[in-house]
């Protein structure tokens, strides 16, 4: 039994790291710009398919394609911000939230259809030669690829953390998220800060997509379930808590994994129910402020 | 006495917004509520109208306790209020805006035709007669304030709380507003008015209540209050 | 447009629609009409809570599914069809009553996410308990006819539109809209916002349940989990927004356009392309045309009639 638990724990960490990564991008956008990007998962899908193409067409190893995906999706995110959201971002909070939600919803309708046209509805997985391999540590099988995924997630999140804490950009982000009007008066280019923040969030979704393509598979409708997961983790962690998002993701991953042993098909439903209860009684999340 | 406030207190986190407040308002009076920024005037309005619940003390209206009633309940009892930052129903017509108040307020009229007639009378009284089918979103500041008052009046209040109606008005508009407030008083409606424009409030009020840091520091006729040392200090600082 | 004209036009349209099955036996046409009427019902039902009251309930599919499942079960157990529909809708409304109080404690974005999650929970539970498709018994399969399905759709669609019409001209309608516009101000003016939101929710979910009943009656075979898929919510939402949120004609025009586009596009492009088109329209509506197609139409009408029309 302990072996089983240990194995599921490791599996939980593997998937939890991905949950954390997908959520951090969403949390960043929500915390700084007060915009909920409901199409966040769609960018994960784009990243996954892009890495798949690089692998299938040009034989680029998926781990090597990570920086390419990051740059491509950063640019894509910037583009979308410019075209769709720049005007909305400066509105009064309620209107901004509603409009950005609706725009995200529109994208959520469009992206999967484009994906079906380009890649068909079949599942696509990125399977390099070393895919199935694993290393036995103690009595647990630690699979190479998911483990590397965890490392990637940690590296990316650390990078973001350093970016926010140590750079001028990070200061600009923190200032803008607290009070954009004051930040503007102090000379911070609010528009550019928002642009980069949004693009960063999208880039991180894309990176998560590559990892999903490696460890699971990419389908045109994979977007929504990942957006939902990210929403849950964001609420669990508390909005705006970037570090908290990662840990909350890990917690969700482990709880789901271990819970599945006992709850079987109802695991996800139970998780959602717990989420609802937290939403109602502790909306600031586990790590957020009251 | 139409309104009795006793030992009223309200704290937000560590901040004391209202502290041990006691006062009484008599029927037909026009009471001015003044004090420096942050002294708790709007909080008091929120407590009376049911938007907030006090931590201590009670409020009685016509002898009946209304502490803890939800805002719609307070309205049903006969207390109406306006908001400092107007809250129009932007995508509805002016007439519809007032109809909501008429059909849901105290002594509400359920018949649409009758309600419409009453509302058109109110719009005429307030000076918005020709614009009844305009959408509230198209209104400028002055008309929005008029609408705010019209809606409050439509709920047939016995007590009306006006929150800074004069802010942002020109001198001429202010004269109109003052005479409007006076005529509302002439209908027998008791008024409590929060105002920063001293000239206006000194002119209209029967008595003034002065708040500072959530406490009442003075109460009396405008003449008495204006010469009160504590009041002068509160406004000018030490 | 004055009262008599309105009644005549509505009567005329209804009469024409009633004659459709008598003039054609083409099943594809009848199916097309039936689905349009289904979507009119579904979208109008969401319009009540989302369009008029301003509460973006993303769990609408749950009530569609509950109505569908219950009415189908009751009908196949021998209950006469109209009663089965009614009871199915009441089941949906009852569920709304149960979750209404806790659901409306959530505000803004939390309400949106919360309702979505709630519907997902229900979908997973139903999918796990009833994974296999429900098929009509062979006796009913052999006598299956689209015609009664069409008339039921027509009747229910008419009822739903009539309900929305009645609400929009009533005191209730004013109260609901005031909540949408500014909940705090509405409360201060005497509107019991809690109760009103709940009432709108009950009415909305009742008609969603009826819509579900139509679909369940129409389907010769259906997988229970599919009835609870969020696509039913999203279809309703996009139809309402693109058509004209908070209007009576909006969802009707939106539904006609939606099903038409779906049928046309599916001839040349992969299955769901109409969704992508609607996605683009949706974004256009949000950014430039908040009143939807209705607003577009009235702008065009003003443009065409030019100076002779006063604002």
Image (cartoon, coloured by chain):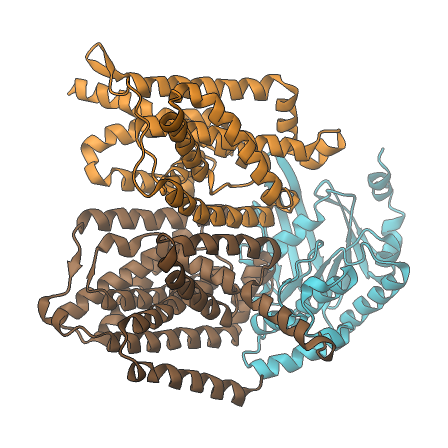
In percent of width and height, residue A267 lies at 25, 37
Q: Residue at x 30, y 64 (%)?
A: C212
Q: Residue at x 43, y 34 (%)?
A: A44
Q: Does the rendering let one see residue C126?
A: yes
A260 or B161: nearer the eye? A260
Q: Residue at x 79, y 43 (%)?
A: B36
Q: Which chain is orange?
A: A
| Residue C191 relative to residue B6: left or right | left
Q: Is residue B192 above or below residue A195?
A: below
| Residue A135 relative to residue A226: left or right | left
Which quarter of the figure is the N terminus of chain C placed in? Answer: bottom right
Res. C60 image quadrant: bottom left
Q: Colour of chain C?
A: brown
Res. A269 image quadrant: top left
| Residue A212 relative to residue C137: left or right | right
| Residue B118 relative to residue A255: left or right | right
A31 or A49: nearer the eye? A49
Q: Which chain is cyan?
A: B
Q: Looking at the image, which residue sits at the far left?
A: C139
Q: Does the rendering let one see residue C248?
A: no
In percent of width and height, residue A27 lies at 50, 33
A59 or B170: nearer the eye? A59
In percent of width and height, residue B146 lies at 75, 66
Res. A276 image quadrant: top left
Q: Is residue B54 above or below residue A187?
A: below
Q: Residue at x 59, y 66 (%)?
A: C296
In percent of width and height, residue B70 lies at 53, 58
The total of numbered circles placed on residues is 0
């Amino acid at each position: 039994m302990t072996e089983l638990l240990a194995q599921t724990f490791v599996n939980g960490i593997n998937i939890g790291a991905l949950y954390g990564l997908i959520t951090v991008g969403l949390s960043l956008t929500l915390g700084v710009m007060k915009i909920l990007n409901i199409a966040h998962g769609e960018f994960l899908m784009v990243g996954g398919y892009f890495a798949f193409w690089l692998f299938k067409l040009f034989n680029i190893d998926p781990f090597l394609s990570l920086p390419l995906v990051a740059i491509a999706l950063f640019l894509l995110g910037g583009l979308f911000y410019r075209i769709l959201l720049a005007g909305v971002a400066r509105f009064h909070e309620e209107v901004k939230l509603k409009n950005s939600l609706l725009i995200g919803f529109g994208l959520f309708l469009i992206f999967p259809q484009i994906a079906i046209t380009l890649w068909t509805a079949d599942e696509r997985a990125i399977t390099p030669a070393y895919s199935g391999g694993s290393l036995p540590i103690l009595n647990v099988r630690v699979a190479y690829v998911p483990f590397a995924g965890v490392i990637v997630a940690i590296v990316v999140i650390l990078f973001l953390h350093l970016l926010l804490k140590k750079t001028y950009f990070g200061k600009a982000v923190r200032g803008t998220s607290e009070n954009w009007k004051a930040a503007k008066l102090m000379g911070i280019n609010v528009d550019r800060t928002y642009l980069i923040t949004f693009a960063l969030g999208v880039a991180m979704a894309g990176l998560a997509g590559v990892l999903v393509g490696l460890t699971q598979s990419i389908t045109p409708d994979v977007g929504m379930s990942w957006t939902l997961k990210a929403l849950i983790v964001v609420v669990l962690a508390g909005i705006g808590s970037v570090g908290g998002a990662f840990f909350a993701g890990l917690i969700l991953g482990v709880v789901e994994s271990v819970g599945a042993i006992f709850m079987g098909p109802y695991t996800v439903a139970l998780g959602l129910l717990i989420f609802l209860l937290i939403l109602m009684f502790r909306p600031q999340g586990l790590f957020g402020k009251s | 006495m139409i309104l009795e406030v006793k030992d009223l207190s309200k704290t937000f986190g560590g901040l004391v917004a209202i502290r041990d407040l006691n006062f009484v308002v008599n029927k037909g009076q026009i009471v001015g509520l003044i004090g420096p920024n942050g002294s708790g005037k709007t909080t008091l309005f929120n407590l009376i109208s049911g938007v907030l619940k006090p931590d201590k003390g009670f409020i009685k209206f016509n002898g009946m306790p209304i502490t803890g009633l939800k805002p719609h309940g307070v309205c049903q009892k006969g207390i109406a209020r306006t908001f400092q930052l107007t809250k129009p129903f932007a995508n509805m017509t002016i007439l519809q805006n007032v109809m909501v108040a008429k059909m849901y307020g105290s002594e509400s009229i359920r018949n649409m035709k009758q309600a419409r007639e009453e509302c058109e009378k109110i719009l005429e009284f307030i000076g918005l007669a020709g614009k009844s089918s305009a959408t509230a979103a198209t209104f400028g500041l002055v008309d929005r304030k008029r609408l705010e008052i019209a809606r409050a009046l439509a709920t047939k209040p016995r007590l009306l709380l006006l929150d800074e109606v004069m802010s942002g008005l020109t001198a001429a508009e202010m004269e109109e507003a003052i005479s409007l407030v006076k005529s509302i008083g002439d209908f027998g409606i008791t008024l409590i008015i929060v105002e920063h424009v001293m000239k206006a409030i000194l002119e209209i009020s029967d008595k003034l209540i002065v708040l500072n840091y959530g406490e009442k520091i003075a109460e009396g006729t405008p003449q008495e209050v204006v010469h009160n040392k504590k009041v002068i200090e509160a406004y000018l600082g030490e | 447009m004055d009262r008599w004209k309105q009644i005549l036009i509505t009567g005329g349209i209804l009469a024409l629609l009633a004659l459709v099955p008598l003039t054609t036996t083409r099943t594809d046409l009848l199916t097309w009409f039936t689905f349009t009427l289904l979507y009119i019902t579904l979208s109008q039902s969401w319009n009540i809570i989302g369009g008029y009251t301003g509460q973006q309930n993303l769990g609408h599919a749950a009530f569609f599914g509950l109505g569908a499942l219950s009415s189908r079960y009751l009908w196949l157990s021998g209950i006469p069809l109209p009663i089965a529909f009614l009871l199915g809708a009441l089941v949906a409304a009852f569920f709304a009553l149960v979750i209404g109080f806790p659901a409306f404690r959530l505000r803004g974005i939390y309400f949106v996410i919360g309702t979505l999650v709630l519907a997902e929970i229900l979908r997973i539970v139903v999918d796990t308990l009833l994974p296999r498709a429900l098929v009509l018994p062979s006796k009913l399969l052999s006598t299956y006819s689209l015609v009664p399905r069409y008339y039921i759709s027509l009747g229910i669609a008419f009822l739903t539109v009539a309900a929305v019409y009645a609400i929009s001209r009533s005191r209730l309608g004013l109260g609901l809209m005031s909540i949408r516009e500014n909940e705090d101000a509405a409360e201060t003016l005497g509107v019991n916002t809690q109760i009103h939101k709940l009432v709108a929710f009950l009415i909305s979910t009742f008609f969603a349940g009826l819509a579900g009943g139509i679909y369940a009656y129409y389907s010769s075979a259906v997988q229970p989990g599919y009835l609870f898929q969020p696509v039913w919510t999203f279809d309703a939402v996009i139809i309402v927004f693109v058509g004209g949120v908070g209007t009576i004609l909006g969802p009707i025009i939106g539904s006609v356009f939606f099903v038409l586009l779906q049928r046309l596009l599916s001839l040349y492009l992969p299955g769901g392309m109409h969704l992508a088109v609607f996605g683009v329209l949706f974004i256009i509506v949000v950014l430039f045309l908040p009143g939807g197609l209705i607003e577009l139409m009235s702008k065009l009408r003003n443009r065409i009639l030019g100076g002779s029309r006063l604002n």
